[in-house]
Amino acid sequence: MSPRNENNKTITFSIREEERDRERRSALRAVYDALSEKGYNPLNQIVGYILTEDPTYITNHRNARAIMSRIDRDELMSALLKVYLGL
């Protein structure tokens, strides 16, 4: 009988959905605030970006464009629909 080697086990890591939601919400708030500060209509600009993935909808102010580009659009749309539908 060989001793168990705990170092040979594969460890899986997953971020809970709540943590992902919190990160997305924080990122979207930062982008929203940056767009507002620059005088844009943040909702229109974010929707334009989501629909087209054209980064020029998002300002570079406060690094908003880079922040927005890190958000997966499919996951974002799924999260938005879940909230909208109350799921």
Image: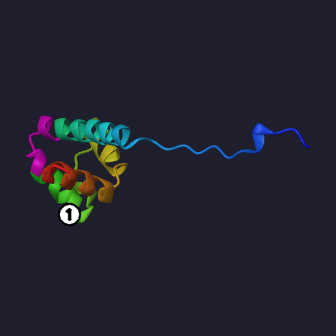
Q: Is residue 9 above or below residue 33?
A: below
Q: Which of 34/8 is in front?
A: 8
Residue 57, can we see it? no
Taking 67 as reference, is 6 left or right?
A: right
- Element under disc 1: helix
Query: Coloring scheme of the render?
Result: rainbow
Q: Report the number of numbered marks.
A: 1
Q: In this view, does 8 lie to the left or right of 72?
A: right
**In this orientation, which residue lies closer to the viewer: 36 or 10?**
10
Q: Is residue 61 above or below residue 68?
A: above
What residue appears at the point 22 percent right and 49 percent down from the top-left corner?
A: 58
- Does the magenta-highlighted stretch encompass residue 75? no
| Residue under label 1 | 51
Q: Where is residue 56 in the image (x, y as percent from the top left)?
A: 23, 55
Give residue 4's position: percent from left, percent from top.
82, 39
Identity of the residue furthest to the front in this view: 1
Q: Which of 71 and 7 is in front in this view?
A: 7
Q: Which residue lies furthest to the bottom in this view?
A: 52
Q: Which residue is drawn at 58% across and 45% down?
A: 12
Q: Residue 41 lies in magenta, yes or no? A: yes
Q: Residue at x 41, y 41 (%)?
A: 16
How busy is the neighbourhood of tag 1: few (under 14 within 10 Å), some, or many (20 plus)?
A: few
Q: What residue type is labelled 1?
A: Leu
Q: Where is residue 71 in the image (x, y as percent from the top left)?
A: 34, 49
As drawn, which residue projects farthest toward the right? 1
**Residue 84 in the figure: left or right of residue 24:** left
**Residue at image location 8% in from the left, 46% down from the top:** 41
Residue 12, can we see it?
Answer: yes
Q: Position of residue 45 (x, y in %)?
A: 15, 52
Bounds of the magenta span? 35-43
* Image quadrant where one finds the N terminus: top right
